Image: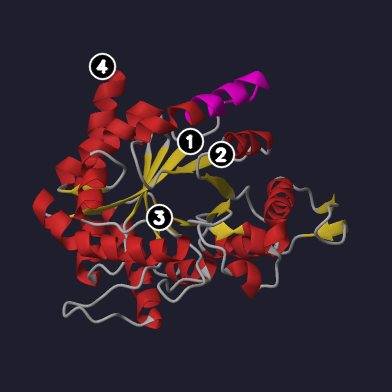
């Protein structure tokens, strides 16, 4: 658990959304990947604690292999942690995941971490030959194996129903340390209990509505640990946002992109159309951290204190936003938001 910096780590996440140039033209996926390595360089320079890239297999997102992008970033950064948001464990192999991230950890001198989860889309299931009817058992069993591998001795054994047993299995390369790991949770009691049962810290994905509505899940997380006599595990939150020079400027920069992305996904899922009203409600009352550095810092600090967080990550890519606006947001987050959040949290916790 974090013990300095006001007791809070502050990170950035991206799902690799395809962005646009200053003229509004969509960038290529290849350019987007190169840009994300540059985002990591900027974040490293301005003092962001962690940068994490998510896995998607869709045309509106560029990153399908976040470990590869992170490996590229590892060679051009010095101190920032390099993680995922998330690795879709249900359609991957936990052994291969551990081998890839042990490799990344070696390359980065101990800066790799993994957030595993079900993911927010299901394209990877048919793409990699998995049956959606096995949705629950695939994640349950693979998460069980993953949690075991985090603390596995040199050789390990495992058995389940989705694959043949592992007898005297060996992970290569061996980790020099226990890889940092989280499990992404969308907000169900079963997911909270699963995180505690497997002793993997919980990263709450709060992407809409007020953060306050997640207080029961936080209490359940704490109570479940206390019930079995565990030391408290870290707790994190991941929410979207964008920072600019003023509140109005930030809203203007992300409004159309957010609505476009929300409606594109909504058409696939049967959601009603979104518009400016919903956007404004999420910014003013929900969990969309959009505004000036002071506005965003105040709102992040409120969430940190409300939920008792050890980690807060802002998802800085939100649909087809301009690339130069993303870079400015990353820079302002490190140079202006992070110091202010720590000042606010420290004052509240010491007062």
Which numbered disc, 2 or 4, marks the residue that appears first in the sequence? 2
Query: Residue 338: image x %, image y %?
Result: 26, 44
Residue 220 x/y as whole percent? 55, 26
Q: Secondary structure at mark 4?
A: loop
Which dot, 1 or 3, sits closer to the camera? 1
* Number of the front mark, 2 or 3: 2
Q: Which residue is mark 1?
A: 235
Q: Point out the tag, 1 or 2, that comes first from the N-terminus.
A: 2
Q: Is residue 69 above or below residue 262?
A: below
Q: Residue at x 41, y 40 (%)?
A: 311
Crowding near pointer 1: few (<14 within 10 Å), some, many (20+)? many
Q: Are the residues flagged by discs 1 and 3 in contact, CB closer than 8 Å?
A: no
Say which label, 1 or 4, has the lower sequence index: 1
Provide the residue span drawn in magenta.
218-231
Q: Quadrant of residue 126?
A: bottom right
Q: Position of residue 71 (x, y in %)?
A: 50, 69
Q: Is residue 161 left or right of residue 321?
A: right
Whether pointer 4 and pointer 3 mark residues with C-beta atoms closer than 8 Å, the reply is no
Residue at point 52%, 62% (across, down): 121
Say which of marks 4 and 3 sits in front: 4
Report the side of 331 relative to 316 (left or right).
left
Q: Residue beneath label 2, please? A: 201
Asked whether the residues under the numbered discs 1 and 4 touch, taking CB atoms below 8 Å apart as contact, a structural biologist would say no
Evaluate if marks 1 and 2 touch, with contact meaning CB atoms under 8 Å apart.
yes
Q: Is residue 229 magenta?
A: yes
User: Of helix, strand and loop, which one carries label 3?
Assistant: loop
Give residue 351's mark.
4
- Residue 256 image point, x, y percent: 21, 64
> How far apart are the two marked residues, 2 and 4, measured between alpha carbons?
28 Å
Instruction: Give the distance between the C-alpha atoms of the residues marked 1 and 2, in whole angstroms.
Output: 6 Å
Specify the label residue 80 is tagged with. 3
Q: Quadrant of the C terminus?
A: top left
């Amino acid at each position: 658990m974090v013990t300095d910096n006001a007791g809070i780590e502050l990170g950035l996440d991206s799902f690799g959304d395809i962005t646009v140039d200053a003229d509004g033209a969509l960038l290529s996926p290849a350019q987007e990947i190169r840009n994300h390595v540059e985002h990591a360089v900027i974040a490293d320079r301005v003092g962001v604690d962690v940068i994490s890239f998510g896995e998607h297999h869709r045309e509106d997102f560029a990153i399908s292999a976040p470990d590869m992008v992170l490996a590229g970033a590892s060679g051009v950064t010095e101190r920032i942690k390099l993680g995922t948001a998330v690795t879709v464990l249900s359609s991957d192999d936990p052994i291969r995941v551990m081998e890839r991230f042990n490799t990344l950890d070696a390359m980065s001198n101990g800066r790799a971490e993994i957030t595993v989860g079900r993911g927010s889309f299901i394209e990877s299931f048919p793409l990699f030959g998995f049956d959606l009817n096995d949705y629950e058992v695939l994640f349950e069993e693979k998460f069980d194996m993953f949690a075991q591998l985090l603390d596995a001795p040199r050789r390990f054994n495992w058995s389940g129903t989705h694959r043949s047993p592992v007898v005297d299995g060996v992970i290569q390369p061996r980790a020099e340390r226990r890889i940092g790991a989280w499990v992404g949770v969308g907000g169900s009691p079963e997911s909270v209990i699963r995180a505690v049962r497997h002793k993997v810290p919980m990263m709450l994905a709060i992407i809409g509505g007020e953060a306050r509505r997640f207080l029961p899940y936080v209490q359940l997380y704490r109570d479940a640990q206390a019930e079995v006599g565990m030391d408290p595990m870290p707790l994190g939150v991941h929410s979207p946002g964008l920072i600019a020079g003023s509140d109005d400027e930030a809203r203007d920069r992300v409004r159309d992109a957010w609505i476009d992305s929300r409606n594109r996904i909504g058409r696939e899922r049967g959601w009603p159309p979104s518009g400016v009203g919903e956007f404004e409600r999420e910014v003013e009352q929900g969990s969309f951290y959009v505004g000036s550095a002071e506005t965003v810092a105040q709102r992040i600090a409120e969430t940190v204190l409300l939920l008792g967080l050890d980690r807060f990550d802002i998802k800085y890519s939100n649909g087809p936003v301009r690339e130069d606006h993303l870079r400015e947001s990353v820079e302002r987050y490190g140079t202006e938001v992070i110091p202010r959040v720590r000042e606010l949290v420290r004052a509240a916790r010491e007062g």
